[in-house]
Amino acid sequence: QVQLVESGGGLVQPGGSLRLSCAASGSISNIASMGWYRQSPGKQRELIAFITSAGSTMYADSLKGRCTISGDTAKGTVYLQMDSLKPEDTAVYYCNVGTLGFGVPRYYWGQGTQVTISS
């Protein structure tokens, strides 16, 4: 089992920046990937970016060019730096962890952190 705690959400003016943090605890030695998703009211949860245990990163189109993912899966930490934020970036942002133990993949979600972009 893996437990996740997110932080860093809040209210930011358009054009501003935020840095989200996620810390994992529990069976972190099996972490294969850590990433971020977001969900706006009435929309499906969408991938933003993820980082693998090999250090590779992948960005979806949702915030591509305006965000940077970083972290250390061995330590169970992942960060999302978001810049040039727009009102349409308002959403609940979720940390996601994928583990692989004994060949069995499992996925865990944080409780979510609210990000609101408004003047």
Image (spheres, rainbow, N blue to C red):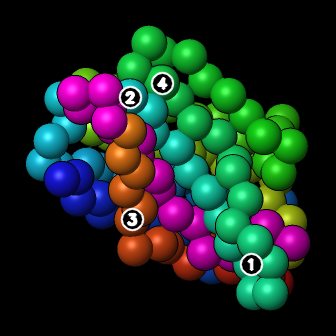
Q: How crowded is mark 3: few (under 14 residues within 10 Å), some or many (20 or more)?
A: some
- Looking at the rendering, which quadrant does residue 10 occupy? bottom right
How far, Cα to Cα, is label 4 from label 2?
Answer: 6 Å
Mark found first going from the N terminus, 3 or 2:
2
The numbered disc on residue 40 is: 1
Contact (Cβ within 8 Å) of mark 4 with mark 1: no
Tags 3 and 2 touching, CB below 8 Å: no
Describe the element under mark 3 as helix, strand or loop. Answer: loop
Instruction: Determine crowd level at label 4: few under 14, some 14-19, many 20+ residues with C-alpha closer than 10 A.
Output: some
Element at label 4? strand
Rendered image: mark on residue 52: 4
Q: Over which residues does the magenta segment extend?
A: 88-104
Q: Which of 67 and 29 is in front in this view?
A: 29
Magenta-colored stretch includes residue 95: yes
- Give the distance between the C-alpha atoms of the residues marked 3 and 4, in whole angstroms: 18 Å
Task: Identify the amino acid type marked 1.
Answer: Ser
Badge 4 or badge 2: first in the primary sequence: 2
| Circle 3 or circle 2, nearest the eye | 2
Q: Earlier in the sequence, mark 4 or mark 1?
A: 1
Tell which circle, 1 or 3, labels the residue nearer the N-terminal end: 1
- How far across and down, in percent of the image, does residue 49 sit? 65, 40
Amino acid type, mark 3: Gly
Q: Do the residues labelled 4 and 2 touch (CB within 8 Å)?
A: yes
